[in-house]
Image: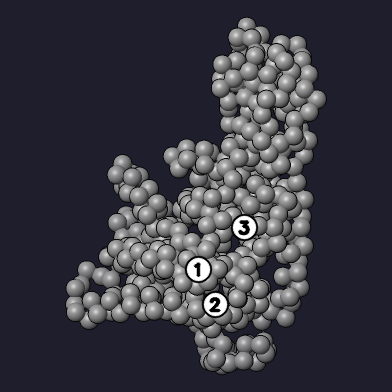
Protein backbone atom coordinates (compact mmCIF):
# COMPACT_ATOMS: atom_id res chain seq x y z
CA UNK A 1 0.00 0.00 0.00
CA UNK A 2 1.13 3.53 -0.73
CA UNK A 3 0.93 5.36 2.59
CA UNK A 4 -1.43 8.32 2.71
CA UNK A 5 -2.98 7.69 -0.71
CA UNK A 6 -6.64 7.25 0.31
CA UNK A 7 -8.75 9.43 -1.96
CA UNK A 8 -12.49 9.09 -1.14
CA UNK A 9 -12.95 12.75 -0.25
CA UNK A 10 -13.71 16.01 -2.06
CA UNK A 11 -10.95 18.39 -3.06
CA UNK A 12 -10.22 21.16 -0.55
CA UNK A 13 -9.24 24.80 -0.62
CA UNK A 14 -5.64 25.18 -1.78
CA UNK A 15 -5.50 21.84 -3.61
CA UNK A 16 -3.70 21.39 -6.93
CA UNK A 17 -5.16 18.54 -8.96
CA UNK A 18 -3.22 17.12 -11.92
CA UNK A 19 -5.21 15.05 -14.43
CA UNK A 20 -2.56 12.78 -15.94
CA UNK A 21 -3.69 10.91 -19.03
CA UNK A 22 -4.02 10.47 -22.77
CA UNK A 23 -6.16 12.18 -25.43
CA UNK A 24 -9.38 11.72 -23.44
CA UNK A 25 -7.83 13.97 -20.80
CA UNK A 26 -6.01 16.15 -23.34
CA UNK A 27 -9.38 17.22 -24.75
CA UNK A 28 -10.23 18.17 -21.20
CA UNK A 29 -14.03 17.83 -21.16
CA UNK A 30 -14.65 15.51 -18.19
CA UNK A 31 -11.93 17.30 -16.25
CA UNK A 32 -13.51 20.63 -17.15
CA UNK A 33 -16.97 19.47 -16.02
CA UNK A 34 -15.48 18.44 -12.68
CA UNK A 35 -13.95 21.91 -12.39
CA UNK A 36 -17.34 23.45 -13.25
CA UNK A 37 -18.87 21.61 -10.32
CA UNK A 38 -16.22 22.71 -7.85
CA UNK A 39 -16.30 26.32 -9.02
CA UNK A 40 -20.06 26.50 -8.46
CA UNK A 41 -20.58 24.17 -5.48
CA UNK A 42 -17.57 25.39 -3.49
CA UNK A 43 -17.01 28.96 -4.76
CA UNK A 44 -14.93 29.83 -1.70
CA UNK A 45 -12.34 27.14 -2.48
CA UNK A 46 -9.33 28.05 -4.60
CA UNK A 47 -8.49 24.81 -6.37
CA UNK A 48 -6.07 24.59 -9.28
CA UNK A 49 -7.01 22.03 -11.92
CA UNK A 50 -4.18 21.07 -14.29
CA UNK A 51 -4.62 19.30 -17.62
CA UNK A 52 -1.65 16.97 -18.12
CA UNK A 53 -3.07 14.80 -20.86
CA UNK A 54 -1.37 14.07 -24.17
CA UNK A 55 -3.09 12.42 -27.10
CA UNK A 56 -1.56 9.09 -28.06
CA UNK A 57 0.19 8.59 -24.73
CA UNK A 58 0.27 5.46 -22.57
CA UNK A 59 1.26 4.48 -19.05
CA UNK A 60 4.72 3.64 -20.38
CA UNK A 61 5.15 6.81 -22.42
CA UNK A 62 3.97 9.05 -19.58
CA UNK A 63 6.93 8.16 -17.38
CA UNK A 64 9.24 10.63 -19.09
CA UNK A 65 6.64 13.38 -18.63
CA UNK A 66 6.53 13.19 -14.84
CA UNK A 67 8.99 16.05 -14.10
CA UNK A 68 7.32 18.53 -16.46
CA UNK A 69 3.67 17.46 -16.31
CA UNK A 70 3.32 16.39 -12.67
CA UNK A 71 6.20 17.27 -10.33
CA UNK A 72 6.43 20.87 -11.55
CA UNK A 73 3.01 21.63 -10.06
CA UNK A 74 3.72 20.04 -6.65
CA UNK A 75 0.21 18.54 -6.72
CA UNK A 76 -1.88 17.50 -3.75
CA UNK A 77 -3.80 15.11 -6.02
CA UNK A 78 -2.94 13.16 -9.16
CA UNK A 79 -5.70 11.56 -11.22
CA UNK A 80 -4.43 8.74 -13.47
CA UNK A 81 -6.37 7.92 -16.64
CA UNK A 82 -4.57 5.61 -19.07
CA UNK A 83 -5.44 2.48 -21.00
CA UNK A 84 -6.95 3.35 -24.38
CA UNK A 85 -3.52 3.42 -26.04
CA UNK A 86 -2.06 0.67 -23.85
CA UNK A 87 -4.54 -1.96 -25.07
CA UNK A 88 -2.81 -2.28 -28.49
CA UNK A 89 -5.96 -1.75 -30.53
CA UNK A 90 -4.14 -2.95 -33.64
CA UNK A 91 -4.08 -6.45 -32.17
CA UNK A 92 -7.87 -6.66 -32.43
CA UNK A 93 -9.52 -7.71 -35.65
CA UNK A 94 -11.70 -10.52 -36.95
CA UNK A 95 -8.58 -12.68 -37.17
CA UNK A 96 -7.59 -15.06 -34.39
CA UNK A 97 -4.00 -15.68 -35.38
CA UNK A 98 -1.82 -16.79 -32.50
CA UNK A 99 0.47 -13.80 -33.02
CA UNK A 100 -2.41 -11.44 -32.35
CA UNK A 101 -3.45 -13.41 -29.30
CA UNK A 102 0.08 -13.11 -27.92
CA UNK A 103 0.06 -9.36 -28.61
CA UNK A 104 -3.20 -8.98 -26.71
CA UNK A 105 -1.92 -10.86 -23.69
CA UNK A 106 1.33 -8.90 -23.76
CA UNK A 107 -0.55 -5.60 -23.93
CA UNK A 108 -2.54 -6.45 -20.81
CA UNK A 109 0.57 -7.55 -18.90
CA UNK A 110 2.51 -4.48 -20.02
CA UNK A 111 -0.32 -2.18 -18.96
CA UNK A 112 -0.46 -3.66 -15.48
CA UNK A 113 3.30 -3.47 -15.08
CA UNK A 114 3.65 0.02 -16.56
CA UNK A 115 0.79 1.50 -14.55
CA UNK A 116 2.35 0.14 -11.37
CA UNK A 117 5.72 1.62 -12.32
CA UNK A 118 4.17 4.95 -13.30
CA UNK A 119 2.39 5.29 -9.97
CA UNK A 120 5.58 4.48 -8.05
CA UNK A 121 7.54 7.11 -9.98
CA UNK A 122 4.84 9.73 -9.46
CA UNK A 123 4.76 8.92 -5.74
CA UNK A 124 8.49 9.62 -5.59
CA UNK A 125 8.25 12.84 -7.62
CA UNK A 126 5.12 14.21 -5.90
CA UNK A 127 5.38 12.97 -2.31
CA UNK A 128 2.45 14.92 -0.90
CA UNK A 129 -0.04 13.86 -3.60
CA UNK A 130 -3.00 11.59 -3.04
CA UNK A 131 -4.06 9.43 -5.95
CA UNK A 132 -7.25 8.68 -7.86
CA UNK A 133 -7.24 5.90 -10.47
CA UNK A 134 -9.76 6.06 -13.33
CA UNK A 135 -10.52 2.98 -15.37
CA UNK A 136 -10.25 3.12 -19.15
CA UNK A 137 -13.39 4.20 -20.95
CA UNK A 138 -15.19 2.18 -23.63
CA UNK A 139 -14.24 1.28 -27.17
CA UNK A 140 -17.50 1.06 -29.10
CA UNK A 141 -16.99 -2.02 -31.27
CA UNK A 142 -20.75 -2.49 -31.74
CA UNK A 143 -21.30 0.95 -33.30
CA UNK A 144 -22.74 1.63 -36.74
CA UNK A 145 -21.11 5.03 -37.38
CA UNK A 146 -23.17 7.44 -39.47
CA UNK A 147 -21.00 10.52 -39.08
CA UNK A 148 -17.67 9.29 -40.45
CA UNK A 149 -16.00 11.98 -42.58
CA UNK A 150 -15.82 11.00 -46.27
CA UNK A 151 -12.02 11.45 -46.29
CA UNK A 152 -11.40 9.45 -43.10
CA UNK A 153 -8.42 7.09 -43.19
CA UNK A 154 -6.24 5.12 -40.81
CA UNK A 155 -6.91 3.27 -37.56
CA UNK A 156 -10.13 5.13 -36.77
CA UNK A 157 -11.88 3.66 -39.82
CA UNK A 158 -11.29 0.06 -38.71
CA UNK A 159 -13.54 -1.67 -36.19
CA UNK A 160 -11.17 -3.38 -33.76
CA UNK A 161 -13.59 -5.98 -32.40
CA UNK A 162 -12.84 -7.36 -28.96
CA UNK A 163 -11.08 -4.21 -27.83
CA UNK A 164 -13.94 -3.27 -25.51
CA UNK A 165 -13.70 -6.55 -23.60
CA UNK A 166 -9.95 -6.06 -23.25
CA UNK A 167 -10.50 -2.59 -21.83
CA UNK A 168 -12.99 -4.01 -19.31
CA UNK A 169 -10.30 -6.42 -18.13
CA UNK A 170 -7.88 -3.53 -17.74
CA UNK A 171 -10.56 -1.66 -15.80
CA UNK A 172 -10.72 -4.58 -13.40
CA UNK A 173 -6.98 -4.32 -12.81
CA UNK A 174 -7.25 -0.58 -12.10
CA UNK A 175 -9.90 -1.14 -9.43
CA UNK A 176 -7.93 -3.97 -7.85
CA UNK A 177 -4.81 -1.82 -7.82
CA UNK A 178 -6.69 1.04 -6.19
CA UNK A 179 -7.85 -1.28 -3.42
CA UNK A 180 -4.30 -2.55 -2.88
CA UNK A 181 -2.81 0.93 -2.86
CA UNK A 182 -5.43 2.47 -0.59
CA UNK A 183 -6.39 4.94 -3.35
CA UNK A 184 -9.77 5.83 -4.77
CA UNK A 185 -10.57 3.79 -7.87
CA UNK A 186 -13.41 5.02 -10.06
CA UNK A 187 -15.07 2.76 -12.63
CA UNK A 188 -15.86 4.83 -15.72
CA UNK A 189 -16.15 1.85 -18.05
CA UNK A 190 -19.28 0.27 -16.55
CA UNK A 191 -21.65 3.28 -16.46
CA UNK A 192 -20.65 4.25 -20.00
CA UNK A 193 -21.10 0.72 -21.34
CA UNK A 194 -24.39 0.18 -19.52
CA UNK A 195 -25.85 3.44 -20.78
CA UNK A 196 -24.63 2.76 -24.31
CA UNK A 197 -26.24 -0.69 -24.41
CA UNK A 198 -29.50 0.66 -23.00
CA UNK A 199 -29.76 3.31 -25.71
CA UNK A 200 -28.46 1.01 -28.45
CA UNK A 201 -31.34 -1.42 -27.82
CA UNK A 202 -33.82 1.06 -29.33
CA UNK A 203 -31.47 3.35 -31.28
CA UNK A 204 -29.10 1.21 -33.40
CA UNK A 205 -27.06 4.22 -34.52
CA UNK A 206 -26.71 5.88 -31.10
CA UNK A 207 -23.09 6.54 -30.08
CA UNK A 208 -21.45 7.94 -26.94
CA UNK A 209 -18.18 8.40 -28.79
CA UNK A 210 -17.08 10.11 -31.97
CA UNK A 211 -17.08 8.05 -35.16
CA UNK A 212 -13.62 6.78 -34.21
CA UNK A 213 -15.27 4.66 -31.46
CA UNK A 214 -12.68 5.92 -28.94
CA UNK A 215 -13.28 9.50 -27.86
CA UNK A 216 -16.41 10.25 -25.80
CA UNK A 217 -18.57 13.19 -26.84
CA UNK A 218 -20.11 15.69 -24.41
CA UNK A 219 -22.71 13.28 -23.02
CA UNK A 220 -20.07 10.62 -22.37
CA UNK A 221 -17.76 13.11 -20.65
CA UNK A 222 -20.69 14.30 -18.52
CA UNK A 223 -21.34 10.73 -17.36
CA UNK A 224 -17.65 10.39 -16.55
CA UNK A 225 -17.65 13.62 -14.51
CA UNK A 226 -20.83 12.75 -12.61
CA UNK A 227 -19.45 9.29 -11.80
CA UNK A 228 -16.23 10.88 -10.54
CA UNK A 229 -18.03 13.40 -8.33
CA UNK A 230 -20.36 10.81 -6.81
CA UNK A 231 -17.39 8.57 -6.00
CA UNK A 232 -15.70 11.47 -4.20
CA UNK A 233 -18.73 12.03 -1.99
CA UNK A 234 -19.17 15.70 -2.86
CA UNK A 235 -22.02 17.71 -1.35
CA UNK A 236 -25.29 17.32 -3.25
CA UNK A 237 -26.92 20.42 -1.77
CA UNK A 238 -26.77 23.82 -3.45
CA UNK A 239 -29.24 25.06 -0.85
CA UNK A 240 -32.22 23.65 1.07
CA UNK A 241 -34.69 26.23 2.29
CA UNK A 242 -38.04 25.81 4.04
CA UNK A 243 -40.40 28.60 5.14
CA UNK A 244 -43.81 28.92 6.76
CA UNK A 245 -45.98 31.50 5.00
CA UNK A 246 -48.37 31.77 7.94
CA UNK A 247 -45.75 32.37 10.61
CA UNK A 248 -43.41 34.24 8.24
CA UNK A 249 -40.62 32.10 9.62
CA UNK A 250 -37.69 30.09 8.32
CA UNK A 251 -37.82 26.46 9.40
CA UNK A 252 -34.76 25.27 7.48
CA UNK A 253 -31.88 27.02 5.75
CA UNK A 254 -29.05 24.73 4.67
CA UNK A 255 -26.10 26.31 2.83
CA UNK A 256 -27.98 29.60 2.55
CA UNK A 257 -28.98 32.64 4.56
CA UNK A 258 -32.63 33.75 4.43
CA UNK A 259 -33.67 37.25 5.48
CA UNK A 260 -36.35 39.94 5.07
CA UNK A 261 -39.27 37.52 5.12
CA UNK A 262 -42.50 39.42 4.48
CA UNK A 263 -46.12 38.83 3.55
CA UNK A 264 -47.19 40.12 0.17
CA UNK A 265 -50.59 40.10 -1.43
CA UNK A 266 -51.47 36.44 -1.76
CA UNK A 267 -48.03 35.09 -0.97
CA UNK A 268 -44.61 35.60 0.57
CA UNK A 269 -41.36 37.41 -0.22
CA UNK A 270 -37.88 36.86 1.17
CA UNK A 271 -34.19 37.35 0.37
CA UNK A 272 -31.70 34.49 -0.07
CA UNK A 273 -27.91 34.46 -0.08
CA UNK A 274 -26.90 30.96 -1.16
CA UNK A 275 -23.38 29.72 -0.51
CA UNK A 276 -23.26 27.87 -3.85
CA UNK A 277 -24.63 27.91 -7.38
CA UNK A 278 -26.39 25.10 -9.23
CA UNK A 279 -23.96 23.04 -11.28
CA UNK A 280 -24.07 23.83 -15.02
CA UNK A 281 -24.66 20.93 -17.40
CA UNK A 282 -23.51 20.46 -20.98
CA UNK A 283 -26.49 20.86 -23.31
CA UNK A 284 -25.78 17.40 -24.75
CA UNK A 285 -26.34 15.85 -21.31
CA UNK A 286 -29.52 17.72 -20.35
CA UNK A 287 -31.93 14.96 -21.51
CA UNK A 288 -30.38 12.35 -19.20
CA UNK A 289 -29.87 14.23 -15.94
CA UNK A 290 -32.86 12.46 -14.42
CA UNK A 291 -31.75 9.02 -15.51
CA UNK A 292 -28.40 9.37 -13.78
CA UNK A 293 -29.87 10.87 -10.63
CA UNK A 294 -27.85 13.99 -11.28
CA UNK A 295 -30.33 16.33 -9.61
CA UNK A 296 -30.86 14.09 -6.58
CA UNK A 297 -27.23 13.21 -5.96
CA UNK A 298 -25.35 16.28 -7.21
CA UNK A 299 -27.66 19.26 -7.78
CA UNK A 300 -30.26 19.92 -5.07
CA UNK A 301 -31.46 23.53 -4.88
CA UNK A 302 -34.54 22.86 -2.79
CA UNK A 303 -37.33 25.24 -1.80
CA UNK A 304 -40.32 24.39 0.40
CA UNK A 305 -43.04 26.81 1.48
CA UNK A 306 -45.77 25.60 3.85
CA UNK A 307 -48.92 27.44 4.85
CA UNK A 308 -49.97 28.80 1.48
CA UNK A 309 -53.67 28.85 0.71
CA UNK A 310 -54.84 26.37 -1.93
CA UNK A 311 -54.16 27.56 -5.46
CA UNK A 312 -51.43 28.02 -8.04
CA UNK A 313 -48.39 30.22 -7.37
CA UNK A 314 -45.69 31.89 -9.44
CA UNK A 315 -42.11 32.17 -8.20
CA UNK A 316 -40.01 35.08 -9.39
CA UNK A 317 -36.36 35.70 -8.47
CA UNK A 318 -34.95 39.18 -8.92
CA UNK A 319 -38.01 40.03 -10.98
CA UNK A 320 -37.67 37.03 -13.32
CA UNK A 321 -40.56 34.57 -13.41
CA UNK A 322 -38.99 31.11 -13.04
CA UNK A 323 -41.89 28.69 -12.56
CA UNK A 324 -45.36 27.86 -11.30
CA UNK A 325 -46.49 25.28 -8.75
CA UNK A 326 -49.52 24.46 -6.63
CA UNK A 327 -49.54 25.16 -2.91
CA UNK A 328 -49.24 21.43 -2.26
CA UNK A 329 -46.23 21.11 -4.59
CA UNK A 330 -44.46 24.00 -2.88
CA UNK A 331 -45.20 22.54 0.54
CA UNK A 332 -43.60 19.29 -0.59
CA UNK A 333 -40.39 20.96 -1.91
CA UNK A 334 -39.28 21.71 -5.46
CA UNK A 335 -35.80 21.55 -7.01
CA UNK A 336 -34.88 24.83 -8.70
CA UNK A 337 -31.40 23.84 -9.87
CA UNK A 338 -32.14 23.16 -13.55
CA UNK A 339 -34.69 25.92 -14.16
CA UNK A 340 -33.19 27.94 -16.98
CA UNK A 341 -34.96 31.16 -15.97
CA UNK A 342 -33.34 31.23 -12.53
CA UNK A 343 -30.76 34.03 -12.27
CA UNK A 344 -28.51 31.56 -10.44
CA UNK A 345 -28.72 29.21 -13.42
CA UNK A 346 -27.67 32.03 -15.74
CA UNK A 347 -24.82 32.88 -13.40
CA UNK A 348 -23.62 29.28 -13.33
CA UNK A 349 -23.69 29.18 -17.12
CA UNK A 350 -21.34 32.15 -17.18
CA UNK A 351 -18.93 30.08 -15.07
CA UNK A 352 -19.35 27.16 -17.49
CA UNK A 353 -18.59 29.38 -20.48
CA UNK A 354 -15.55 31.01 -18.85
CA UNK A 355 -14.16 27.60 -17.93
CA UNK A 356 -14.74 26.45 -21.50
CA UNK A 357 -12.60 29.29 -22.83
CA UNK A 358 -9.85 28.30 -20.40
CA UNK A 359 -10.21 24.64 -21.40
CA UNK A 360 -9.58 25.55 -25.01
CA UNK A 361 -6.42 27.44 -24.04
CA UNK A 362 -5.30 24.43 -22.00
CA UNK A 363 -5.98 22.12 -24.95
CA UNK A 364 -3.75 24.20 -27.21
CA UNK A 365 -1.01 24.20 -24.57
CA UNK A 366 -1.28 20.42 -24.43
CA UNK A 367 -0.73 20.36 -28.20
CA UNK A 368 2.58 22.14 -27.56
CA UNK A 369 3.45 19.58 -24.88
CA UNK A 370 2.62 16.86 -27.40
CA UNK A 371 5.34 18.18 -29.70
CA UNK A 372 7.83 18.16 -26.83
CA UNK A 373 6.85 14.64 -25.78
CA UNK A 374 6.93 13.20 -29.30
CA UNK A 375 10.35 14.57 -30.26
CA UNK A 376 12.32 14.94 -27.04
CA UNK A 377 15.29 12.61 -27.12
CA UNK A 378 15.50 12.91 -30.91
CA UNK A 379 16.36 16.62 -31.00
CA UNK A 380 16.71 19.59 -28.65
CA UNK A 381 13.08 20.65 -28.22
CA UNK A 382 14.07 23.56 -25.95
CA UNK A 383 15.91 25.26 -28.82
CA UNK A 384 12.80 26.04 -30.83
CA UNK A 385 14.63 27.39 -33.87
CA UNK A 386 16.84 24.30 -34.10
CA UNK A 387 13.77 22.13 -33.52
CA UNK A 388 11.90 23.77 -36.40
CA UNK A 389 14.92 23.35 -38.69
CA UNK A 390 15.28 19.68 -37.70
CA UNK A 391 11.62 18.97 -38.45
CA UNK A 392 11.91 20.59 -41.86
CA UNK A 393 15.10 18.73 -42.74
CA UNK A 394 13.66 15.41 -41.65
CA UNK A 395 10.46 16.04 -43.57
CA UNK A 396 8.44 14.89 -40.57
CA UNK A 397 4.73 14.41 -41.25
CA UNK A 398 1.77 13.15 -39.28
CA UNK A 399 -0.13 13.83 -36.09
CA UNK A 400 2.62 15.31 -33.90
CA UNK A 401 4.49 17.16 -36.63
CA UNK A 402 1.44 19.36 -37.19
CA UNK A 403 1.86 20.77 -33.67
CA UNK A 404 5.44 21.93 -34.23
CA UNK A 405 4.73 25.32 -35.92
CA UNK A 406 2.46 26.34 -33.04
CA UNK A 407 5.03 25.11 -30.56
CA UNK A 408 7.82 27.12 -32.18
CA UNK A 409 5.70 30.27 -32.12
CA UNK A 410 4.24 30.04 -28.64
CA UNK A 411 6.56 27.96 -26.45
CA UNK A 412 8.91 30.88 -25.67
CA UNK A 413 5.84 32.56 -24.11
CA UNK A 414 4.58 29.45 -22.33
CA UNK A 415 5.10 30.81 -18.82
CA UNK A 416 3.24 33.98 -19.68
CA UNK A 417 0.30 32.01 -21.04
CA UNK A 418 0.25 29.89 -17.89
CA UNK A 419 0.24 33.00 -15.73
CA UNK A 420 -2.60 34.36 -17.86
CA UNK A 421 -4.61 31.20 -17.25
CA UNK A 422 -4.24 31.63 -13.51
CA UNK A 423 -5.39 35.23 -13.84
CA UNK A 424 -8.43 34.07 -15.83
CA UNK A 425 -9.25 31.62 -13.03
CA UNK A 426 -9.45 34.55 -10.64
CA UNK A 427 -12.13 35.99 -12.92
CA UNK A 428 -14.01 32.69 -12.77
CA UNK A 429 -13.96 32.83 -8.96
CA UNK A 430 -15.52 36.28 -9.19
CA UNK A 431 -18.21 35.04 -11.59
CA UNK A 432 -19.09 32.22 -9.20
CA UNK A 433 -19.41 34.41 -6.12
CA UNK A 434 -22.97 34.03 -4.73
CA UNK A 435 -25.24 37.06 -4.78
CA UNK A 436 -28.19 38.14 -2.65
CA UNK A 437 -31.43 37.30 -4.47
CA UNK A 438 -35.00 38.47 -3.82
CA UNK A 439 -37.73 35.81 -4.08
CA UNK A 440 -41.45 36.49 -4.49
CA UNK A 441 -44.13 33.80 -4.43
CA UNK A 442 -47.48 35.22 -5.56
CA UNK A 443 -50.79 33.46 -6.03
CA UNK A 444 -51.98 33.34 -9.63
CA UNK A 445 -55.48 34.64 -10.42
CA UNK A 446 -58.09 31.91 -10.78
Q: Earlier in the sequence, mark 3 or mark 2?
A: 3
Q: Nearer the viewer, residue 275 or 345?
A: 275
Residue 6, image x and y in percent? 52, 63
For the question of whether residue 91 can be seen, the reply is yes
Q: How is the image coloured?
A: one colour
Report helix, strand or loop for mark 2: helix
* Residue drawn where x is 68% and y is 39% of the image: 255
Query: Which residue has dot 1 on it?
Result: 80
x then y, percent, for residue 144: 32, 54
* Residue 445 as seen in the image, left or right of residue 109: right
Q: Can residue 26 be seen at all in this image of the molecule?
A: no
Q: Quadrant of the C terminus?
A: top right
Which residue bears the numbered disc 2? Answer: 122
When asked about the image quadrant of residue 67, the answer is bottom right
Number of residues whose C-alpha sits closer than 10 Å to that of mark 3, classed few (under 14), some (14–19) or many (20 or more): some
In the picture shown, does residue 282 fall above or below 120? above
* Number of the label disc, if any, that sits on residue 11: 3
Looking at the image, which residue is at 24% across and 80% down?
102
Lower sequence index among marks 3 and 1: 3
Q: Which residue is at 66% across, 35% downward?
A: 254
Amino acid sequence: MLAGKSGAEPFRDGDTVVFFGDSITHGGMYYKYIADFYRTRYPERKIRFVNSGIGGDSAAGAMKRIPEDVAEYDPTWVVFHFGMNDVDRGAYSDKSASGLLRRRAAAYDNYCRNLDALVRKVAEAAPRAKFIYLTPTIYDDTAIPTNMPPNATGWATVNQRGCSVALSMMAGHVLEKAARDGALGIDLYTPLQNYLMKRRANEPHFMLTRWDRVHPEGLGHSIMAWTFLKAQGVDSVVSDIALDANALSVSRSANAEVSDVAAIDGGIAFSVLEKALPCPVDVAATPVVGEFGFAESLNREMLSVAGLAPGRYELSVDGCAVGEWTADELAGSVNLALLGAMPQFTQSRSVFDANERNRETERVLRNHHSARWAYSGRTDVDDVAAFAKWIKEKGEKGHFAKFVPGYVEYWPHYREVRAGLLAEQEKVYALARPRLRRYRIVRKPR
